[in-house]
Amino acid sequence: MFSSMTVRELEDTIKIIERYERELINRDKIQQVLKSRVAEVVMTKKRAARKRAKILQRRIHLAQETAMLAGTAPAPIDPNLQLEFDYIMNYLKLDEPIINDLFRSLTEEELKIVHQYLR
């Protein structure tokens, strides 16, 4: 196959192969960066959500304990606290909103780079 090719054709073929290798290397680098960014954002968001859930849970328990100590009927849980707590617990189960938050955090340059790999 290569014996019938001219030197020029061989050089062009080598250039094409080298360009392809560079593109593969760039794609791998971008994928690694994105994976680390995703992991970082997911961990940070989940950590913050867990902390907020613990705070809400403490507030709910304190309200119940206060009512018990006062000798009154069990205090109804503040529906807003319960809604927020449920929302956070559901948020922790879903990765999609976290990933969407990641894409919102990318700069325009990063989005341009990433966009070509999302097609």
Image (tube, rainbow, N blue to C red):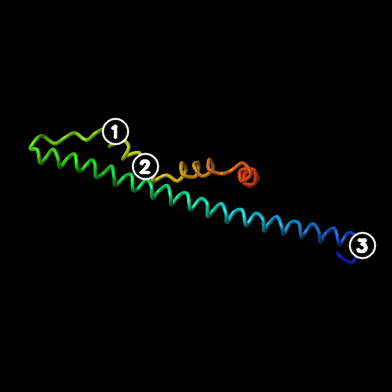
Residue placed furthest toward the left: 71
Side of 105 relative to 18 (left or right): left
Mark 2, Cα crowd under 10 Å, few <14 / some 14-19 / many 20+, is few
Residue at figure coordinates x 40%, y 48% from the top left: 46
Cα–Cα span, label 2 and label 1: 15 Å
Q: Amino acid at mark 1?
A: Asn
Q: Position of residue 87 (x, y in %)?
A: 35, 39
The residue where tag 2 is placed is 90
The residue where tag 3 is placed is 6
SS class, disc 2: helix
Q: Quadrant of residue 70?
A: top left
For this rendering, which residue is in front, 95 or 37?
37
Q: Amino acid at mark 3?
A: Thr
For this rendering, which residue is in front, 64 or 14?
64
Residue at figure coordinates x 11%, y 40% from the top left: 68
**Front position among marks 2 and 3:** 2
Q: Amino acid at mark 2?
A: Asn
Q: Quadrant of the C terminus?
A: top right
- Could you tell me if the residues under marks 1 and 3 are in contact, i.e. CB atoms within 8 Å? no
Mark 3, Cα crowd under 10 Å, few <14 / some 14-19 / many 20+, is few
**81 over 48 or under it: above or below:** above
**Front position among marks 2 and 1:** 1
- Could you tell me if the residues under marks 2 and 3 are in contact, i.e. CB atoms within 8 Å? no
Q: Quadrant of residue 26?
A: bottom right
The residue where tag 1 is placed is 80
**69 over 11 or under it: above or below:** above
